[in-house]
Image (spheres, rainbow, N blue to C red):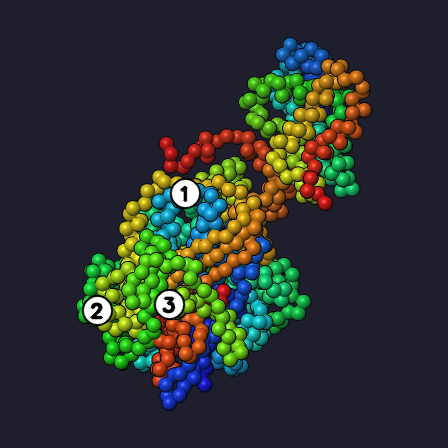
Amino acid sequence: MIKRLIEQIEGEAILTFETKEERITDVTIDFPHFRGIESILQGRPARDALVISPRVCGICSHSHLMASVRALEDLLHHHGVHIALSDKAKTIREITLYCELIQNHLKWFYLTLAPKLAKLTQTEPPAYLAMHRAVTQITGVIATFAGQWPHTSYAIPGGIASDPTPLEVMQADTLLCSVIDFFEERMIQESLESILALTHDEKLFTLGGDLPDMLRLLEREGLDKLGQSYGRFIVLGSHSLFSPAKLSTEISHSVDFNHVTEKTTPRYGQETFAKNVRFNGEFYETGPLARALVRQEPLIHQMFQSNRDTISTRITARVYEIALLLHACRQRIASLDLNEPSYIEPECSWQTLSGQGVGIVEAPRGSLIHTITLEHGTIQASQIITPTQWNLGNATPQEPGVAQKAMLGLSDTEVAEFVFRTFDICSICTTH
Amino acid sequence: MRRSKESKKIDIIKTALRLFSKRGFYTTTIPEIAKAMSMSAGNFYNYFSSKEKLAEEIIRYISEYLATKIRTINESPHLSTKEKIREIVHIYFQIAIEEPEMLDFFLRIYLSNREIYKERCQGITCIMAFVTELMIFFDDGVQKGDLRNQNFFSAFGLFMGYLGGMVFLNGEAILPEPLESYEESITENIYRALKNDDQA
Amino acid sequence: MMTKPKVIWLQGASCNGNSHAFFNYPYLKTLLQAFDFLYHPLLPSPLPLASIVNDYSITCDILIFEGSVDAKFNRAGLSSDTLLQRFDGRAKTIIAAGTCASFGGIFSENDQNTSGILYRHEQPLNKPLISQSDVINLPGCPVHPHNLATILLALKANQPIPLDTMHRPKEIYAHTVHQGCSRSEYFEWKVDAKSFGHKEGCLFYEQGCRAPMTHGNCNLVLWNEVNSKPRAGIPCFGCTDPKFPNFSFFHTPKNMSIPAEIPLDVSKRAYLTISGIAKTFSIPRLKKRLLDD
Ligand code: SF4
């Protein structure tokens, strides 16, 4: 039995490996960090969720805000209250959410992944300080619309709280352009448009930049084809770029949220706070790779065809998503009509509301679900299912979870840890 | 020197109040007020630059006067909310009886001739001291859970409109009984109208 | 040449929000060059966490502690109270980064025994966790990166840092969050925001802005260099306050139209007088939308 403490992720995780004849036969993933956000919400007025939920997680606080606001809007909708979001409010919510995904992916690549790979291969990792500047700029875009990042509560049922002016939007656009410059100069040395038009990884391998460098290094070290899991993918959130779909043998756009189940698989009598999540009884991978595949992005589709869901496909999908999101943000900023209202007050009395609502968003690591139950305006129950519960949930060696399966059969636990990191681990979200 | 100027001003205000209530605000002239004070009209203007200025100072004076009395009630922690209502009703009626010209001016001049005050006393500016004390009274009653939490002006109107109405009826000699004999029932009515029904 | 102070950043029960907020500090490179960071939860660090906490020969000048102290909550196999106490005296100064570390914060809602380093909300702990190191509280959910960075630099420069009675640097927390808000003119003239989503109007009267009752500098030192919550139409939730999060958010509790809570240390009588008068004046410039003709 080998235990490894995984640090420099969001929180920490403990991996316990069982090996036989130098192959990993089982791995348990433990997240020791339960904080009980769901019960903190109990007994509070409905809109307190918009302040408490973001505090589930510092790196994806805005995604939690969005899931909560959608849950409350869904609840109002079931109650017959008309929720009219202006296009402006919808678009700004999308922009800030996408920016949160971007900052996450940047940090993941340079802080979670690259240093570990450098250690593994005894090479120099790419410097992270240029990325740091890009992160301050992309969070600056969020703050322009949302007041601050992390932990904003600017999305409220009926719209957004802010009222950006044309010059502020201009300022956000400039920050965004600067992040695009960083991406084109450092991550993939090519224009965003050309990157998004790529159809084959052959071309990607000829380009400069930290991603192609990493892919070449992985290939040279013979690591690129590791980390394959079930090859089943799911997307549950609806956005301008993403819509609910699943892929096992083919893409299906009808996914019934009611088939999602959450439960703990007790192992070795030990309690873990991470509950795993399945769809129709099966494990699915969620996140950037799932999103790219159901969107049928040509480059990622081709890599999946050739290499399946190995780490090189998974890593590329996440970096590729940065390009996709940057491009989408610029388009959306240009399309804003600031004369529209930011907020249309829902006609309801928050003090008397009862019912249940579900809010689903695509967070950095995949589909995030908040369910809120109200009785006379007070939160009776809340349930949060995080993307990492899909990807990193624990199960048995016979039927392992997504990340577990990706690590089985490897011989080196250091390599297994690297494979684990490609899923972008957040122990904080997982246990909440 | 300052102090004597202030007290002289107050004397003028009191005299003016008496004359206004006897002869009417518009018909009473500044020379008449000066004469009643045994001073020259020219000297009067050292104290008040115009009749409008005098009217403004009078209403501020009345407001402060009422405020000081209610403030004493507000700052009596041993009084219950209902007892405070009784005290406020009491002092209001007492003023109506002992210094009728004061409430007379308030009800008949200030409230009915708003054009005089348009320039000088926007909204409730000049009676703020008095309104503030009632705010403090209401706020305290709600905090204690005695009074229902509602719109301030709905409660203020109910309370002061009621008292003003009674003083008016009394002034017109319509009330069959002396004003103070209604204190208890009026207190009860105001309390019932404002009280918090969810109270344990 | 001055030696670089050694810094270790550890976490209790936390959302990592303070670490991520800190990462927004624009001059991170300069800061990292001025100090010797032995451990930071996000940044590549020279030593693994297990050595940091178990090797008693490792000392530091400054320990930054993020998150609330919860005996049930482990890091590197040690409960967070044990972890923290291992640095009592081993670190010259301990900085409580954020409201959780300062006062218990959000995660103390679930458990009576979860606290900050010195306080649980406003109450000093019965059994102090730290007695030998100096503690500086930097509340905020999360802590503002500039505040943390400047305090680090002041410590390095051996500058005196006057603290208030709750161990907060006066220079940062003597203000209320209200100070510097772009809506302050609306506060002065009692013009309330007609609804969410407007640049105009103050959020104190209807939307529940707690800035005038909260110590902090969010409107003076802007977030992400560009904005603050109240400026962007989001009421201040009082996240730097020892009592955070004990409030119902997004609306102003009122007694007969009178705000139940009024600006810090202002008597209700004074407040009501001034605001009643200010409200009477209708100022066309403040009544219309800013960008309308
Ligand atoms: S919105 Fe809040 S911070 Fe801004 S002026 Fe009003 S009370 Fe002060």
The amino acid type, in three-letter code, at marker 2 is Asp
Asked whether residue C215 is in view, the answer is no
Q: Examine the image and state in which quarter residue C279 appears.
A: top right
Instruction: Give above or below for B34 relative to C176.
Output: above
Mark 2 Cα within 10 Å, few/some/many (few <14, many 20+)? some
The amino acid type, in three-letter code, at marker 3 is Tyr
Q: Residue furthest bottom?
A: A21
Classify residue B29 as left or right of residue A394: right
Residue drawn at 48 percent across, 73 percent down: A265
- Residue A125 image position (x, y, % from top left): 32, 74
Q: Examine the image and state in which quarter residue A215 appears.
A: bottom left
Asked whether residue C256 is in view, the answer is yes
Asked whether the residues under the numbered discs 2 and 1 touch, taking CB atoms below 8 Å apart as contact, a structural biologist would say: no
Residue identifier under label 3 = A284
What is the CA distance from the residue labelled 3 to the residue labelled 1? Answer: 33 Å
The numbered dot on residue A39 is none
Which label's residue is closer to the chain start, 2 or 1?
1
Asked whether the residues under the numbered discs 3 and 2 touch, taking CB atoms below 8 Å apart as contact, a structural biologist would say: no
- Same chain under badges 2 and 1? The reply is yes
Residue identifier under label 1 = A84
- Same chain under badges 3 and 1? The reply is yes
Say which element carries label 2.
helix
Residue identifier under label 2 = A201
Say which element carries label 1.
loop
Q: Chain of mark 1?
A: A
Classify residue A152 as left or right of residue B115: left
Say which element carries label 3.
loop
Considering depth in this image, is C34 or C118 the residue closer to the camera?
A: C118
Residue drawn at 43 percent across, 63 percent down: A260
